[in-house]
Image: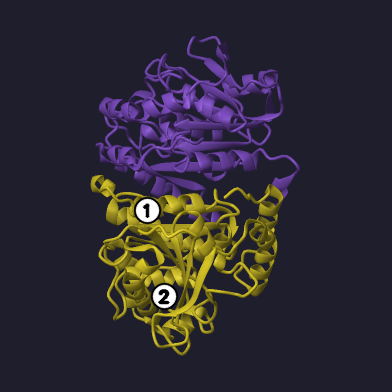
Chain colours: A yellow, B purple
Amino acid sequence: MTEQLPPDVIAQLRALDPAVTPELAQSSWALLTPFHEKAGYTAPNIARDQAYGDHPRQRLDVHTGDDDQGGRPVFVFVHGGGFVRGDKHIPGAPQYDLVGAWAVRRGYVGVTITYRLAPEYQWPSGAEDVAKAVQWLRQNIAGYGGDPDKIVVAGNSAGAVHVASFAAGQGSGAGADPETIAGAALLSGIYEIGTPEAGSPEHVYYGPDPGPEVSSLPGLLEAPIPLLFSVAERDPRFFQEAAASLVRAWIARHAAMPDLVWVEGHNHMSTIGSLTVDEAALGTALARFVDRHTATEGTEGAA
Amino acid sequence: MTEQLPPDVIAQLRALDPAVTPELAQSSWALLTPFHEKAGYTAPNIARDQAYGDHPRQRLDVHTGDDDQGGRPVFVFVHGGGFVRGDKHIPGAPQYDLVGAWAVRRGYVGVTITYRLAPEYQWPSGAEDVAKAVQWLRQNIAGYGGDPDKIVVAGNSAGAVHVASFAAGQGSGAGADPETIAGAALLSGIYEIGTPEAGSPEHVYYGPDPGPEVSSLPGLLEAPIPLLFSVAERDPRFFQEAAASLVRAWIARHAAMPDLVWVEGHNHMSTIGSLTVDEAALGTALARFVDRHTATEGTEGAA
C-alpha cells in the first residue's frame, strides 16, 4: 500500500479528455501500469476460471494469499465494458488481477468475475449472472478462506449497472439481501435508463425502448443492504449527472446523503486502477466500507 | 497516524442522537479524547495567541514541528460554535490543538484561530476576521516555516460558514483568490440562509430578516479557488439538506460533482475529532486536497 502516484502522473491523468473511448483506456493504463508493476498486481494464488454457470463467460477467478486463515471478507469485482466487452483478466496486464491483489493486501479474498454480454444477452442477464456468481461463492468460498456471510460486490461502469441491478432485485436470480451479500459498491454507474440513443451501449443492452422497470434507482433507494457509490472527478458529464441525480433521490427518500466517494484526479477508466497505487483516491474509503460492513462482534447493531 | 478508532467506538459514535447539543459534544469528545491522548494532540511547538487584530478574540495559535524546514503548506482551522461561542483551545483537552498536531504530522504548519462572536458582532464579521487572519499569516507565517502562497483555510460548522463567506467574497476584507489562499475546506457548513427561526444561531448572527446577499452559495459557485466540502454521516438533517442543495447547485453550474467527502461514522461534533485517530474518515481526503493544491512544480497546470 506504499506506492503512491506522483502528483505529475495525477496531473497527466487529469489532463486526458474524459470521454469514454479506447484512447482514454489506453492512455490511462499506460500511465498506471508501471506503478502496478512496481507494486505487484498478482496475488500469491489465483484460482482461474471457476465456472459459476454453464456459459463460457460465467467464470470467476479467486485471489488468495499465502496463509490458510479463514473467515475473511470476500471482495468481488465486476468489470465494465459498455455491456458488450471486457474481461476479468487481461494476460500480462493489471486489468483486473490488480483488484484481486488489492483485496488480498487488505486481508480479503478477492474475486474477479466475468459475465454474458450484449447484444446476445440483454437486460437483466447482468443481474442474473451477478446473482449466480454470488450463489456460487456462498457455496464455495469457504474453501478459499472466505466467509460466505461477508461478501461485498463491487462493479465499475457497466459492472456497476449490473451490480446495481442485482442489488435492486432485478432479474430472476435471488435479489441482494443481507442473507446473500454484506454490501455493494457501485463505481461510476448509471441508475436511471431513459430512451437510449441508437448505437449507445444502453441501446444494445436494454433494447430501443426499455420501460421504467429497467432503472435500478427505485430499488436501490429501498435496498436492504449498505451501498457505497463513487464518481470520478474526471468522469464525463453523463456520470456526473447520474451521481447528482442519485443524491437528489437519496436525500428525498432518506433525508440524508448517500455514502458517495468523489474519486479525486481520476477518470472513468483509471478509478479502479487507483487501487493500491493511489489509495487516497478510492481504496481507503472502499476498504473502510468493506471492513465496517463485514465486521463481526455485532458492531453493526448501532446503525 | 497509526492510532485507529476501533469499530465499537465508531458504533458508539453512530448511536448518539445526531442533534447538535452540548450532550452530543460531551459524549463525542468523551469517546474520542482517550485516543487523542494516546496519539498526542499537541505539536512540538505552539506559539499561542498571536494577535491578528485589536479585538481580544482576534487571536491565533501557530503549531509547528521540531525542525526548521521552511516552505511548508499552512493549514488553518476555524472552529464552530453556533456563531456565539467556541475557542481555538480548550486547556487540557484536544479541542482544537489536535488540528495543529495533525497538520504538523502531515508536514504542514498548523494554525488555529478564533474570531469575534455574535450577538455583538454580526454578519459579515466572521468573513472579515478570516480575511484578517489570512492577511496576518501572509505577512508572518514564513517566520514559522510556512509558505504564504500555500495557505489552506478550513472551517467547521459556524467556522465553515465564515470560511465560505470569506471564500465567496463577503465582507469588507479582501476576498479569497489564488493570490491569498490556495484552497478552502468547508466541513459541515451551511451555504444558504433563509429566514432564521427566532432563537436559532442564524437569527443571532444574521438578524431576523437577512437578505439573499448573506448566502455564500452563489459566490462559492464562482469561487476562483479550489473548494472541498464535507458532510458527516450523522450530521443532522439540516446539514444533509445543505450538502444535497450544494450538489444540486454545483452540477447545474459546473456540470460536475463537487469535491465532497462523506465522513463515515461521524457526527457534527466528532468530524474534526476524527483527524489523526480515524484518518480514513476525513484526514486522508483532507490531506490529499491540501497536498494537491499546494504542490509546486506547476502540477496544477493540467487542471
Q: Which of A210/A14 is in front?
A: A14
Q: Residue at x 51, y 53 (%)?
A: A283
Dot 1: within a 10 Å radius of its alpha carbon, few (fewer than 14), some, or many (20 or more) residues?
Answer: many
Tell me which residue sits at (24%, 37%) in the image: B17
- Name the chain letter of the residue that bears numbered label 2: A
Depth order, front residue of B172/B117: B117
Q: Is residue B261 above or below residue A36?
A: above
How far, Cα to Cα, is label 1 from label 2?
Answer: 23 Å
Residue B71 in the image: state x and y as whole percent.
71, 28
Looking at the rendered structure, the kind of residue marked 1 is: Pro
Q: Which mark is residue A75?
A: none
- Which badge, 1 or 2, is on the more N-terminal residue? 2
Residue A110, position as x, y percentages in the image: 46, 64
Label for residue A258? 1
Image height of A27 relative to B13, above or below = below
For the point 41% across and 29% down, which residue is it? B158
Using the image, tell me which numbered label, if any, was put on residue A194: 2
